Image: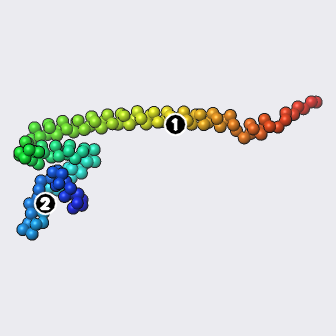
């Protein structure tokens, strides 16, 4: 993970402001590393940054109003709230998948119709048909 990405997450309030050394260097701990891992995983799952911040506010970050996190990490309340957010995202993803499948099926049908039209017009205009039709008919009498 790049320094720029971590600073971006800090600016977007996805991570707590880290402690600093007397020289001004940021100090991160194991929890910070775990939080970055959670953020990256949630991004992969399709969560928007605002949704990620909401999950992180359940137990890590202060609320938007500056109040303390409402839950203890791993508490039933925290897990229930995270479960609700995850289920909501899953439902949204399933709707997007259904829509994408419907659009894909419509596209496949349109492509099939174009292919059928092309094949029908190709069969009507084959070079052998033109060659045979341009020759005079010959009749053999015995």
Q: Position of residue 33 (x, y in %)?
A: 17, 56
Q: Is residue 130 left or right of residue 13?
A: right
> How crowded is the residue under tag 2: few (<14 C-alpha within 10 Å), some, or many (20+)?
few
Q: Which of the marked residues, 1 or 2, is nearer the chain's N terminus?
A: 2
Asked if one can make out residue 56 in the rendered structure from this viewpoint, the answer is yes
* Mark 1, residue position: 111
Q: Looking at the picture, does residue 104 appear above or below residue 21?
A: above
| Residue on which disc 2 sits | 28
Question: What secondary structure is marked by label 2?
Answer: loop
**Mark 1 and mark 2: span between their CA atoms?**
54 Å
Q: Quick one: 80 or 128, which is closer to the camera? A: 128
In this rendering, the count of numbered labels is: 2
x and y percent of residue 102 in the render? 40, 33
Residue sitting at the far top? 141
Q: Residue furthest bottom?
A: 23
Whether residue 31 appears in this view of the structure is: no
Q: In which quadrant of the rendered image does the N terminus lie? A: bottom left
- Name which residue lies at 38% across and 37% down: 100
Name the element at disc 1.
Answer: helix
- In the image, is 42 to the left or to the right of 19? right
Q: Residues within 10 Å of mark 1 (few under 14, many from 20)?
A: few
- Front one among 82 and 137: 137
Q: Position of residue 50 (x, y in %)?
A: 20, 44
Residue drawn where x is 17% and y is 46% of the image? 53
Classify the position of the C terminus by image quarter: top right
Q: Residue at x 16, y 40 (%)?
A: 82
Query: Which quadrant holds residue 46?
Result: top left
Residue sticking out furthest to the right:
142
Query: How far across and down, in percent of the image, does residue 32 sit?
Result: 14, 55
The image quadrant of residue 96 is top left
Disc 1 and disc 2 in contact, CB within 8 angstroms = no
């Amino acid at each position: 993970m790049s320094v720029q990405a971590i600073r971006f997450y800090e600016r977007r309030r996805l991570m707590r402001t880290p402690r600093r050394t007397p020289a001004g260097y940021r100090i991160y701990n194991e929890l910070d590393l775990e939080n970055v891992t959670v953020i990256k995983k949630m991004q992969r799952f399709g969560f928007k940054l605002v949704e990620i911040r909401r999950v992180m506010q359940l137990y890590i970050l202060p609320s938007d109003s500056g109040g303390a996190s409402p839950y203890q990490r791993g508490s039933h309340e925290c897990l229930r709230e995270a479960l609700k957010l995850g289920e909501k995202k899953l439902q949204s993803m399933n709707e997007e998948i259904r829509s994408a499948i419907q659009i894909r099926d419509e596209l496949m049908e349109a492509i099939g119709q174009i292919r059928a039209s092309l094949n029908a017009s190709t069969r009507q205009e084959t070079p052998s048909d033109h060659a045979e039709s341009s020759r005079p008919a010959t009749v053999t009498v015995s």
